[in-house]
Amino acid sequence: MATTEVKPSANKKPKKIRNPSLGPKKDLKKKKTKKSKAPPFDKTIEKSGRNEQRSENNDDELISEPVTASEQLSYFLNLLESAVSIRVSSLELDSIKDTCVVELSQRLAQDVSNLGEHIKLSCGSSWRETLCEGESLEGNVDPGNPSVLVICSSALRSLELLRGLHSLTKQCPAVKLFSKHLKVEEQVALLKKRVNIGSGTPSRIKKLIDIEALGLSRLDMIVLDMHTDVKGFSLFTLPQVRDEFWDLYKNCFHQRVLEGRLRICMYGPKPAPNLKKKKTK
């Protein structure tokens, strides 16, 4: 019997047999995945920068907040004891009243432009005669005896504050009491006239007091500049100037403060421990 040979259909393609050693067949189609958006990196940095800046500004605001006369006095006495290495006795503490510290108006910023207004307000109704009068009245006003002394850490800062006092010194010019570009002889000549306001550095002020060119009989207020320079130093932290200031204060001003004849005005940002928030770890 003859056998017929079956030919494969031309239309059908032969199936490919998969090698079983390759394992189960995987789905080769790519799954669509949602693309995650990148976080707004720049905005995040900007926001965090703003927050840090805001927190720093808040700290600055707390530090420069006005403090009471009692707090300022306590701060000043602590500086005195640590700098001069002496203890202020209880008798001295009892005699030092809060009234020896000038409590400035909180409505005005304590900057250069407002210095004249602050001093005027602190002198009360007699500010014109005390600060502006230019004629030397015999028997009443001795030459070379200012009523206000502004004490700064540098000559440049002293000049800057004098610009803030311009409105008070038109009739009676303020005397520059620093060593930069000024000889002692020139200052002695200027102090032979009536002086209402002087501004300078501790070392030159003390020198002029020691040679009896600068008198203290009229002195009612010392203005201590609390400004910090670009390096972070101030009248109380710049090493040499700090030592010169406390030498001046101890020998020329402290007894007058104890007797209630001299007031202290700390002008500018002051540490306020009771007002400053403690940072939590």
Image (cartoon, rainbow, N blue to C red):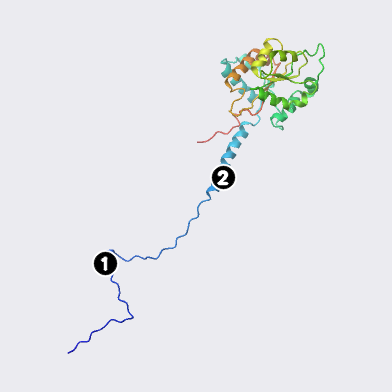
Seen from this angle, which residue lies furthest bottom?
1
- Which x, y percent locates residue 182? 69, 17
- Which x, y percent locates residue 38? 50, 53
Which of the 4 image quarters holds residue 268? top right
Question: Could you tell me which residue is drawn at 57 percent across and 20 percent down?
Answer: 239
Q: Which mark is residue 46?
A: 2
Seen from this angle, which residue lies furthest left?
1
- Which x, y percent locates residue 242? 60, 20
Q: How far apart are marks 1 and 2 (CA)?
A: 59 Å
Secondary element type, mark 1:
helix
Q: Which of 264 and 113 is in front in this view?
A: 113
Relative to 109, residue 237 above or below: above
Q: Which of 21 and 88 is in front in this view?
A: 21
Secondary element type, mark 2:
helix
Q: Can residue 51 be seen in this view?
A: yes
Residue contact at pointers 1 and 2, CB within 8 angstroms:
no
Q: Residue 247 carries which label?
A: none
| Image-based side of 164 in relation to 38, left or right | right
| Image-based side of 101 in relation to 14, left or right | right
Q: Which amino acid, by three-letter code, is at mark 1?
A: Pro
Question: Could you tell me which residue is drawn at 60 percent across and 37 percent down?
Answer: 57
Question: Could you tell me which residue is drawn at 26 percent across and 64 percent down?
Answer: 21
Give whichever of discs 1 and 2 has the lower sequence position: 1
Q: Name the residue under label 1.
A: 20
Q: Which amino acid, by three-letter code, is at mark 2?
A: Glu
Seen from this angle, which residue lies furthest front?
181
Which image quarter is the N terminus in?
Answer: bottom left
